[in-house]
Each structure stands twice: as structure tokens, then as C-alpha cells.
Image (spheres, helix red, strand yellow):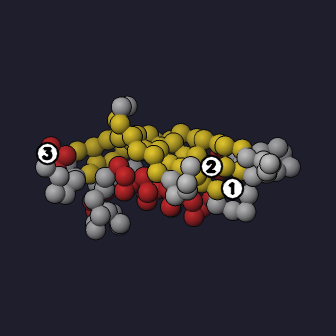
Amino acid sequence: MPARYQLKVVTEFASAHTLRDYPGACSRMHGHNWKVELEAVASQLDEVGMGIDFKAMKQAANAVGDELDHRYLNDLEPFKEINPTAENIAAYMYREISARLNSNTIKVTALTLWETERACVRYSEENE
């Protein structure tokens, strides 16, 4: 059986959004302190004994989060066309971070985005 190291880091950012065509209060501008859980799998360890440095994972997650931090998401691409729902934000972040981290030995497997302490979405593009 091949090696499989599951890694996770947690970061956060704050932003505001408006949900277009939503039949409720979320159709008005409001903000969230989003918590991001990034998960990746490493298939081997480097010479230090790490699959990937947690610092590298945090840097990638923070770089994408910084693009969204303290911004009105509806003004940003791609959210000018699609609603900045938690689901769409999670998918966007997953793809952007994957493009920065994925390699022959590292694969981003999931991103969980917490909108509140009691509500989150977990996005992945793999069968689990």
C-alpha cells in the first residue's frame, strides 16, 4: 500500500458579500469572518521527513485569502458573474490553492470554508 500523509492547516480572512436573488436578509450586504481549513495529501516525505511544510500550505492559503480579505466579494472576479456563496468561494479557493501547491507528491484534497461557527461547506474534486 502506498504512503499517504493527510495534512491540514487552518487560516482565516474577513470579507463582505451580497447574495444576488436570495429571498432573505443575505440579499443585503453583510460580512463574515471566514475560517479556512485546507487539506492535502502527500505521497512521500522529503529529506527532512515532511510531506509538505505546514508553512507552505499556510502561505498558499493566506495568499489566496489575502486577495479576498477585507474586500466586497461581489466586486471581484469571478464573483461578478457567480454569486459569492460559501460554496462558490470554497471552490474558487480550492482551485487557486491547488494551482499553487499540487505537484507529483502533493495534492490538495479538500477545502472547508466556515461562514459561521456553526455553518460550513467542504469542497473537493475527488471521490472519497
Q: Which residue is mark 2?
A: 40
Residue closest to the eye, 15 or 47: 47
Helix, strand or loop at disc 1? Answer: strand
Up/down of 103 relative to 35, above or below: below
Q: Which mark is residue 106?
A: 1
Mark 1–mark 3 CB contact (< 8 Å): no
Q: CA distance from mark 2 to mark 1?
A: 7 Å
Mark 2–mark 1 CB contact (< 8 Å): yes
Q: CA distance from mark 1 to mark 3?
A: 41 Å
Return the disc, 1 or 3, that comes first in the chain's sequence: 3
Q: Mark 2 Cα within 10 Å, few/some/many (few <14, many 20+)?
A: many
Return the disc, 3 or 2, that comes first in the chain's sequence: 3
Q: Which mark is residue 24?
A: 3
The amino acid at mark 1 is: Ile
The image shows residue 33 at horizontal and vertical percentages of 36, 39
Seen from this angle, which residue lies furthest top?
117
Task: Name which residue lies at 50% across and 61% down.
Answer: 95
Task: Name which residue lies at 27% across and 43% down.
Answer: 31
The amino acid at mark 3 is: Gly
Return the disc, 2 or 1, that comes first in the chain's sequence: 2
Q: CA distance from mark 3 to mark 2?
A: 36 Å
Task: Name which residue lies at 65% across and 42% down.
Answer: 7
Q: Quadrant of residue 74?
A: bottom left
Residue closest to the eye, 90 or 48: 90
